[in-house]
Amino acid sequence: MASGERSRRWIASAAAGIALALATVLAACTSHVSDDLNMDALTQSGDAVILMTAVIDRNQEMSCKSVALRTLDNQMPRSVSGKKVSDVKLGTGTILDPGAEVTGSVQIAPGTYKVVEASCSRPDKSGTLNVVSVDPKGFATFSVAAGEVVNLGKLIIIEVIANQPSFMQPARYVYVSHVTELKSDPRSSLNKDLAARLVDRPMTISHPPLPQAELARICRLRREVKGISLATRSPAACTLAGL
């Protein structure tokens, strides 16, 4: 094969890879609410718009593809028009950074809701991890009124060893949630009309947060796990502990 032909193929392959990377990055900040939805249409619909993201810290931080919502009486949420809102689609991170912060938004009827499940990508892309809250109140709750556009923040779900394994029984794990601010600008994933009305109102976690000392202990354990080095993305527990 002539060197010129090899060069052209290499350039085409590289361009395709760059295009895929850019498309994946852009997908990480794409709203799941119609670009045509403006405030007049939102007000007329009687709905609200929510925006959020979620990650799981299970030895390493995983970005979530979706979170499942329920009403406080465990019914599936809907829009005012009756359309089902079973979950908020978030994305799968980027090929450049599997733990990238990705946000999702959805149109939903006014009310009070809870986050009951998170579906997240494993760091090695070997499959999906579904984490379901055993607390009847869910991982976190939030309320929205008609016509509101609300940034609910970043839900962090941390895996904690509830009891050490023994000869008689395996280790038991529980999941504890925290809510923090988004690092990225959430307005970038909404059209200008909705972005201008966006207010920050973080979700409320359903139980007391872990103390700093416990977060620091979990962080140390995370860093000691085989394959996790200081060069990798810091687990969520480390970020919360300021380590």
Image (cartoon, rainbow, N blue to C red):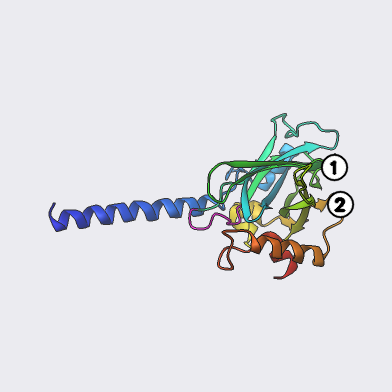
Residue 129 visible (yes or no): yes
Q: Quadrant of residue 21?
A: bottom left
- Residue closer to the observer: 139 or 38: 139
Mark 2 residue element: loop
Mark 1 residue element: loop
Contact between marks 1 and 2 (CB within 8 A): the answer is: yes
Q: What are the residue bounds of the magenta stretch?
A: 95-102
- Residue sitting at 80 percent across and 31 percent down? 75
Residue 182 visible (yes or no): no
Q: Amino acid at mark 2?
A: His
Q: Is residue 107 above or below residue 94?
A: above
- Residue sitting at 38 percent across and 56 percent down? 18
* Residue 66 is covered by the magenta coloring: no
Is 91 placed left or right of 143 in the picture? left
Q: Badge 1: how crowded within 10 Å, few (<14), some, or many (20+)?
A: many
> Residue lying furthest front in this view?
167
Q: Main secondary structure of the magenta part?
A: loop
> Residue lying furthest left in this view?
2
> Residue lying furthest bottom in this view?
243
- Residue 33 horizontal/vertical position (percent): 62, 43
- Residue 192 horizontal/vertical position (percent): 61, 55
Q: Amino acid at mark 1?
A: Lys
Task: Return the disc, 1 or 2, that comes first in the chain's sequence.
Answer: 1
Residue tagged 1:
137
- Residue 153 horizontal/vertical position (percent): 72, 56
- Residue closer to the observer: 66 or 152: 66
- Tell me the CA gap for discs 1 and 2: 9 Å
Residue tagged 2:
207
- Residue sitting at 13 percent across and 51 percent down? 1
Q: Quadrant of residue 77?
A: top right
- Residue sitting at 33 percent across and 55 percent down? 15
Is 106 placed left or right of 80 in the picture? left
